[in-house]
Image: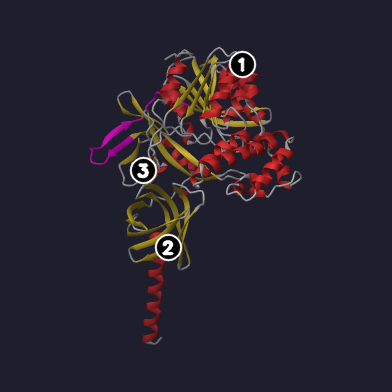
Amino acid sequence: MPHNLLTALAVVICMLLAAQAQSSALDGEWVGGFRIGEISGYLHFDVVSEGEQLRIVLDVVFPPRPQGSALRDLNHDGSVVRFVLALGTEVFAFEGQLQGDSLIGIVRSGVQEGSFDLVRPRSQAQYDPAFFGRYEGAYEIAPNQLIFVRRHDYLSPRVPYGFEYTRLFYMDEFGNTRMLYPSSDSTFFAGPTTLIPTPIERTLEFVSNAEGEVIGIRWRDRGEPERFVPRSTVYREEEVRFRNNDVELAGRLLVPEGKGPHPAIVLVHGWGARTRNEIGVVVADVFARHGIAALVYDKRGTGGSEGDWQETSISDHADDALAAVQLLRGRSDINPRQVGIFTTSYGGLVTPLAASRSKNVAFLILVASPAISQTERYPYVMLPTLRALGWSENELEEAVAFMKLEAEFLMTRSNWPKLREAIERARGTIWFPRTRTGEASATTEDHPFWERAQGNVVLSTYDPRPALRQLTCPVLAIFGELDEAVTVDPNRTVLERMLREGEHPDFTIRVLPDVDHGMGFREGSRADRSRYAPGYFDTMISWLLERVEVNR
């Protein structure tokens, strides 16, 4: 072969290898934070090689915008990486230096300039979610002070609700929570807030004995000496299975140390595909740590449970919860007279119905739980989104009044003349296109939209008031002052009225200040949040310990 041809071939091969190396140098999952002006943000995206091109895919960004958000214009030139984030109507240009698995640089928007810090953790896709399960449990970080390590499963929103990936996290007894990002099979790192891992503040290396059992953590805080955090035996875990008629459900039971019998609590999920591995149910560890056995089970069709939660009625979900209560009542290490239920959000429709059906439910804890139907809540839920669009208070009042008429029609199907008149008055307003009627152009009584909406009417118009009125067991209800999904009022007012009308003998209602729907303490933007609300766990534990007998 001629020498010049060999030379040309070598050059081509080198160019191809260089292009491949450049692409692979940026491929993977990237996560971190950015700060510019008043914005403190969280960014999570993937970079994928497609031939000689790189594609950037946005996974999550905080703060979100009603108008949406997108990443574009990714450019990789040597060690310099550039991309653009469109956040609603704002545009942010990122430019940073790639150094191994870190990407640090400047973000600009108009005349403003800020900084960003991203890191590429080890790919979650290479792990079976069960792999991290060996690290789960309680660890004694200081004398009589624990942290709880759990995993959060991210599931497909569609049947069969399979695992997309999982993420470990830990929470201490003060409610401080951090996601753990892997750098190896046994080593993880965490950052300054729940979501943001940069700059890295601590490293956790799980330690196993010769038999492969995890015995503790080598814990390294930045700038501090390493310490060993041993595994705790304050409670033990069991895999449990139980049935509601022809559906088998699976879950995890935490049993406190000591021979008991123990009081116990069943944790019922909120909306969505949820397994026992969910950050919102780490409260089970808190209950168990204080001597209260805790059972959290996979919703139908997720994890190890049969069925499909989306094809299940509120009534059947309530019976699932009662089946879990019955499982616990039948155990010799559980006090059958002291088994209650905890729930959040959508579960607040399910669990009062369960408790109203059975005297075996000893107590009920309702967190951020609705006391009115979903259709009635819609105007209150929409308010923050509409306000973010810059509408005047007068426009907001008009829009909410119209949405209440929509809700009334959906629930009763009897006030069309009144809604039709309101539609005629609303045409041409700035807010009408944002209503359900305006979005669907459902301006006639026989419009197909109303029939489709009627298909969801059982859920959207389910009224929890009759079940709340029938409750007789002790009830603790906790609302977040800043909850935009289940607003304090009218839900608090309606709940109290229902319990008083039912002459309820023992109920407590608490509103926690500066707290959102997930009981997170509002610290700046969502990207800045790092803990559950002060007083959240203490309120529940102190209330429970006045009503149950803990045997150590």
Element assignment for label 3:
strand
Left or right: 230 as drawn, with respect to 406: left
Which residue does the numbered mark 1 point to in the structure image? Answer: 501
Asked if the magenta segment contains residue 508, the reply would be no
Q: Is residue 418 above or below residue 469?
A: below
Q: Residues within 10 Å of mark 2 (few under 14, many from 20)?
A: some
What's the image's color scheme?
A: secondary structure
* x and y percentages locating residue 449 in the rendered image: 70, 46
* x and y percentages locating residue 154 in the rendered image: 51, 43
**Residue situated in front as seen by the camera: 287 or 36:** 36
Q: Earlier in the sequence, mark 1 or mark 2?
A: 2
**Residue situated in front as seen by the camera: 182 or 443:** 443
Q: Is residue 327 above or below residue 506?
A: below
* x and y percentages locating residue 102 in the rendered image: 33, 54
Residue located 66% across and 45% down the image: 425
Q: Earlier in the sequence, mark 2 or mark 3?
A: 2
**Residue farthest to the right?**
446
Q: Quadrant of the N terminus?
A: bottom left
- Based on the displayed image, in which of its 4 quarters is residue 538 positioned? top left
* x and y percentages locating residue 17 in the rendered image: 39, 70
Left or right: 305 as drawn, with respect to 333: right
Residue located 55% across and 43% down the image: 395
Please state the extent of the stretch shown in magenta in the rendering. Answer: 217-237
Which residue does the numbered mark 3 point to in the structure image? Answer: 188
Q: Is residue 111 above or below residue 10?
A: above
Q: Earlier in the sequence, mark 1 or mark 3?
A: 3
Circle nearer the viewer, 2 or 3? 2
